[in-house]
Image (tube, helix red, strand yellow):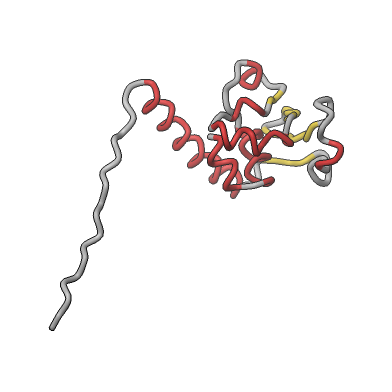
Amino acid sequence: SRTPRRRARVVAMKAPRGEKARRAQEVRDMMAEYYVLRKNRAFEYLQPHPVPYELEDDPGLGVHVRYKGEVHEIYGLSFLNEAAKKGKHTELTCTCVDGWCEELCFPKIHVMMREDEDRCLQAL
C-alpha cells in the first residue's frame, strides 16, 4: 500500500502596509546599492580592524571609514546584538548628517556587514 504524500503547507505572510512597507523597500534598495559599492571598493578603513570588543564598551571609541572623501565614525558596534534583537539599526550611530538623523548610511551598513552579516540584516 502506498502512503499519501503530505504536501507542505505554504503560509502566506501578510505584506507590511504603508510606512513599514516603504521603509522595508528602502532598506532593500540600499542593500542592493551597498553590494555594488562594496564590489567597487568604495569604502576604506582608516584603522586596520574594528575596535576590539573589550575596548568597545567606551562609546567614545569607534570605527573610522572613508566613503566618497568623507570620514564617517561609527560608534556602538558592541550594541550590534541588541540592534539585531530589536530590529533597529539606531543602536549604532554615525557622525554623518544621516547618522545624526538616525538614518542609514552606507559606511554604517559596511561596518555592520563586516562585523556580522546575519545580525546586520536583522537590525535593518
Whole-percent x and y of residue 116?
Answer: 64, 47
122 vs 60: above or below: below
Residue most extreme to the right: 55
Quadrant of res 42: top right
Query: At 59% from the left edge and 49% from the top edge, which residue is drawn?
Result: 39
Q: Nearer the viewer, residue 4 or 68?
A: 4
- The image shows a total of numbered marks equal to 0
Q: Nearer the viewer, residue 30 or 70?
A: 30
Query: At 54% from the left edge and 45% from the top edge, which residue is drawn?
Result: 36
Query: At 72% from the left edge and 30% from the top edge, which residue is drawn?
Result: 69
Residue most extreme to the bottom: 1
**Horizontal placement of 60 versus 76: left or right?**
right
**Horizontal placement of 15 versus 38: left or right?**
left
Whole-percent x and y of residue 72?
Answer: 73, 28
Quadrant of res 83: top right
**Horizontal placement of 30 versus 90: left or right?**
left
Residue most extreme to the left: 1
Whole-percent x and y of residue 90?
Answer: 61, 25
Whole-percent x and y of residue 118?
Answer: 57, 47
On-image quarter of the N terminus: bottom left
